[in-house]
Amino acid sequence: MRVLIVEDEPLIAQRLERFCREILGEKLESIRGATLLSEASARLDESPIDLLLLDLNLHGRDGMELLQASVAGSFHTVIVSANTEQALRAFEFGVMDFVPKPFSKERLASALARVTERDGRAAGAAKFLAVKKYGKVELVEIDRVLYVEGAGAYAELVLADGRRELHDKTLEKLHALLPPGFERIHKSFVVRWSAVKALHASEGSRHEAELRNGTRLPVGRTRYKELREKFG
């Protein structure tokens, strides 16, 4: 795992690094730091990371500026901040966890587990998904997302109006941020469950989910029985 710590208090930055090394062990590939928003942005442009640990008050500047841009990236973000009044807003933008200061090793370990575990889910549901478009970041309301389709190292958001938006996160990472109303139905598809009209089983063990707009999506064979029971 490649980690970037954005924190302007040296002692806290050192504490975060030490805990990360102790918690992640051999999983940790690299760990770097930044104290300014401009420096953090430059580091994000320089090389890819897997996790951003971000403070929301950097020399008096609001870390939400960086957050809104960073959540469009391929990596996960965990906020480490004393500004707990910003927690709900941070979750709405799609962070995995909000660790309030002062923090313990155990609390940070809990946040890192959400990132490293295969089925780890965000502590709060996102309200927006940020996508990069024409050199800027655009927020897409999750209420507009019908389903998400995996596209290799990326994922496509398919909106209710038929539009498609490419996201830098993989399907797995996006699924971790989505609210419980979204269901993984196939290795390449996550769908808004309320949009499913029916489930179909065809010859040759082919299974599909029919959406209310007529779209049919494949359903994984191992998931079909469980989803059928859920469908009721």
Image (cartoon, helix red, strand yellow):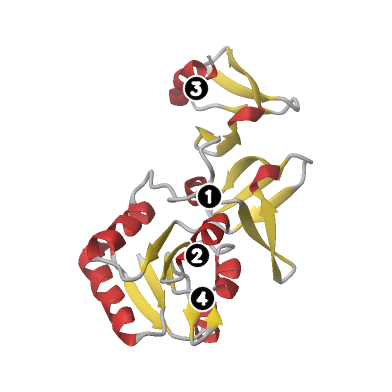
Residue at image x 48%, y 16%? 229
Eye-nearest disc, 2 or 1 = 2
Which residue is label 2 attached to? 85
Q: Provide residue 164's location: percent of width, then percent of height.
A: 72, 48
The quadrant where residue 140 appears: bottom right
Asked if the residue at tag 3 contacts the one at tag 4, i.e. Cβ–Cβ closer than 8 Å, the answer is no
Which tag is nearer the camera, tag 2 or tag 4?
2
Question: Mark 2 to mark 1: distance in Å?
Answer: 25 Å
Image point (24%, 65%), residue name: 105
Choose top left, top right, bottom left or bottom right for residue 12: bottom left
Picture disc at residue 174: 1
Asked if disc 2 and disc 1 are in contact, CB closer than 8 Å, the reply is no
The amino acid at mark 4 is: Leu
Say which label, 2 or 3, has the lower sequence index.
Answer: 2
Q: What residue type is labelled 1?
A: Leu
Residue type at the position of mark 2: Glu
For label 3, the crowd category at 10 Å Cα-Cα, with few meaning under 14, some 14 to 19 and many 20 or more, is some
* Mark 2 burial class by Cα count in 10 Å: few <14, some 14-19, many 20+: few
Dots 2 and 4: beta carbons under 8 Å? no
| Pointer 1 or 4: first along the chain | 4
State whether residue 77 is above or below residue 203: below
Gap between marks 4 and 3 measured at Cα: 39 Å
Real-space CA distance between mark 1 and mark 4, rounded to the nearest whole angstrom: 19 Å
Judging by the rendered image, the residue that carries numbered circle 4 is: 44
Q: Write down the residue under mark 3.
A: 227
